[in-house]
Amino acid sequence: MILKVARLGHPVIRTAAQPVAPEVITTPGFQRLLDDMVETMHEYSGVGLAGPQVHVGLQVAVLEVENHPRYPEMPRVPLTYLINPSITVLDSSTVPEWEGCLSIPEMRGLVPRFRQIRVNALGRQGEALDFVASDFHARVIQHETDHLRGEVYLDRMPDMRSLSHLLEWQRYVLAPAVAGKQS
């Protein structure tokens, strides 16, 4: 089932999510929530989706990048379920890249993110996950874990002058960058 996406301004977006009790993870209701989150992420062409974005104040996120129309050059990120995630920065250098958000539709902004992180979380069946994510994969995880703390990418932008409406961003930022690569 496709879930309703909460937009910036709804209190759930700015409220820290609560941990998921491990015994809840394998219940039919929680498993259905995970399936619904993936379906919703795919429906809206997202690469990640956090519980608060679908009005669920729990520390759960899903992410996946595979032949994505908005990110065709990005490496594949397998479908991943992150429950009660925590991240540790492994490389404190940051990389500024453009981000958007299903909860802040039609906008893009330049956001610095850490290049490499270690992720500890529980997976879909409650199994322990411990892995390293780099570059775009790390960016997506940082974006989604921000949501679990009641934060959005706007909070990470050091200069709000890059904030752009999607159509203007495509016209004045994306199109010139693509033309420059083709030259």
Image (cartoon, rainbow, N blue to C red):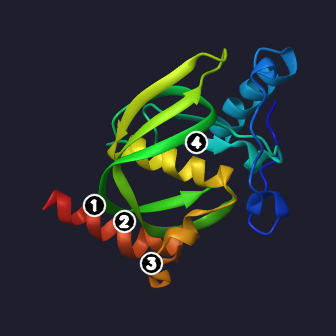
Counting residues from the start of the chain, the first of labels 3 and 4 encountered is: 4
Place of residue 180 in the rendered image (x, y in percent of width and height, measured from the top left): 19, 65
Relative vertical location of residue 65 with respect to residue 10 in this rendering, above or below: above
Which of marks 4 and 1 precedes in the sequence? 4
Mark 4 and mark 2: Cα distance apart in space: 21 Å
The numbered mark, 3 or 2, whose residue comes first in the sequence reads: 3
Q: Label for residue 48?
A: 4
Quadrant of the image occupied by residue 88: top left
Residue at x 29%, y 70% (from the top left corner): 176
Q: Which one is in front, 149 or 31? A: 149
What amino acid type should be assigned to the residue bearing mark 3?
Pro
Would you say 60 lies left or right of 97 here? right
Q: Residue at x 58, y 44 (%)?
A: 46
Residue 158's disc number? 3
- Compared to residue 26, the image places residue 57 above or below, namely below
Q: Residue 168 or 27: which is nearer the viewer?
A: 27
Q: Nearer the viewer, mark 3 or mark 4?
A: 3
Label 1, label 2: how far apart the Cα atoms are: 6 Å
Most extreme residue toward the right is 29
What residue is shown with label 1? 178
Q: Is residue 142 left or right of residue 132?
A: right
The amino acid at mark 4 is Gly
Q: Position of residue 40 (x, y in %)?
A: 71, 37
Give the SS element for disc 1: helix
Residue underneath mark 2: 174
